[in-house]
């Protein structure tokens, strides 16, 4: 039983951690909101972690059924998600870059504004994007050799908690990197990661388009 529990935890963490990549996610969040206080950053990290847990749990448990109900394929999910991520990166690339950037960047407060920003776009699709959702759905549709048991459900829960704790820690302490880089360094990092976000979005979009084009070619044959 303990062996099955450990295997389930490792499968969840090993399958999703490289895709979510909490350290890189924290740097992206820093590039999008570089001038918020420690209290707001702690609240933001908490909300992103909770939202990520909910999305991943839903994807693992009912994600395949939801996509099937609406007739949405994984390829289409990647195209739509990649487009949203690319647009977010493009918006950051076009944002003003001057000495008053700290004043022009919106500073979320606790409440509705912070909750809205924490969910979109910081949780979905920046932290838990179409790639992570697709992997979670694939993991959720795989059945253990001896059938699904309570120990597997416990392993999934612990694996998701480990992932979300890592997300919280990375996002919560990303502000230390901002203070280390300084104003000019933070602006350079913002542009760099804006371009990275844009490239990630284009890559996800291309993966989805490639799958759609391949399916069309197979149908024509």
Image (tube, helix red, strand yellow):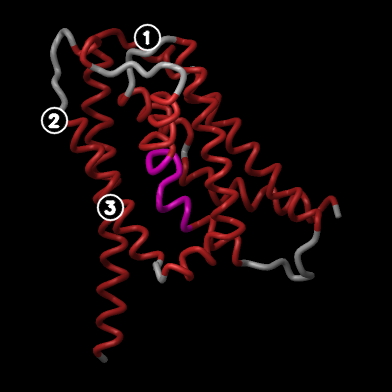
Farthest right residue?
1
Please give the count of numbered marks on the rendered protein: 3
How dense is the environment of label 3, judged by Cα within 10 Å: few (below 14), some, or many (20 and up)?
Answer: some
Farthest bottom residue?
221
Residue 6 is tagged as none
Question: Residue 127 magenta-drawn?
Answer: yes
Question: What residue span does the magenta drawing correspond to?
Answer: 124-134
Front: mark 2 or 1: 2
Q: Earlier in the sequence, mark 2 or mark 1?
A: 2
Helix, strand, or loop for circle 1? helix
- Using the image, determine if residue 80 lies above or below residue 196: below
| Residue pointed to by mark 2 | 94
- State which quadrant residue 218 falls in: bottom left
How far across and how far down the image is residue 96, in percent?
13, 21
- Between marks 1 and 3, how big is the CA–CA gap? 31 Å
- Using the image, determine if residue 166 lies above or below residue 9: above
Which quadrant of the rendered structure holds the N terminus?
Answer: bottom right
Q: Residue at x 50, y 57 (%)?
A: 135
Front: mark 2 or 3: 2
Q: Residue at x 52, y 29 (%)?
A: 47
Helix, strand, or loop for circle 2? loop
Label 1 near label 2: C-beta < 8 Å? no
Which quadrant of the rendered structure holds the C terminus?
Answer: bottom left
- Between marks 2 and 3, how big is the CA–CA gap? 20 Å
| Residue pointed to by mark 1 | 180
Q: Residue at x 29, y 76 (%)?
A: 214
Q: Seen in the image, is 201 located left or right of residue 133? A: left
| Residue pointed to by mark 3 | 203
How far across and how far down the image is residue 50, in percent?
56, 34
How dense is the environment of label 1, judged by Cα within 10 Å: few (below 14), some, or many (20 and up)?
Answer: few
Q: Seen in the image, is 185 located left or right of residue 137? A: left
């Amino acid at each position: 039983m303990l062996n099955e529990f450990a295997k389930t935890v490792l499968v969840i963490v090993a399958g999703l951690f490289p895709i979510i990549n909490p350290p890189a996610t924290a740097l992206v969040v820093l590039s999008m909101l570089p001038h918020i206080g420690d209290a707001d950053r702690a609240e933001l990290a908490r909300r992103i972690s909770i939202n990520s847990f909910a999305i991943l749990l839903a994807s693992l448990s009912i994600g395949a059924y939801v996509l099937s109900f609406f007739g949405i394929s994984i390829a289409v999910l990647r195209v739509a998600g990649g487009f949203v991520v690319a647009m977010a990166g493009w918006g950051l690339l076009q944002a003003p870059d001057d000495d008053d950037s700290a004043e022009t960047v919106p500073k979320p407060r606790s409440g509705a504004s912070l909750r809205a920003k924490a969910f979109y776009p910081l949780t979905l699709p920046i932290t838990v994007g179409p790639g992570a959702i697709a992997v979670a759905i694939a993991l959720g549709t795989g059945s253990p050799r001896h059938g699904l048991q309570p120990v597997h459900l416990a392993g999934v829960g612990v694996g998701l908690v480990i992932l979300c704790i890592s997300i919280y820690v990375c996002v919560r302490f990303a502000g230390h990197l901002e203070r280390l880089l300084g104003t000019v360094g933070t602006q350079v990092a913002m542009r760099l990661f804006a371009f990275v976000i844009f490239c990630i979005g284009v890559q996800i979009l291309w993966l989805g388009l490639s799958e759609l084009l391949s399916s069309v070619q197979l149908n024509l044959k």
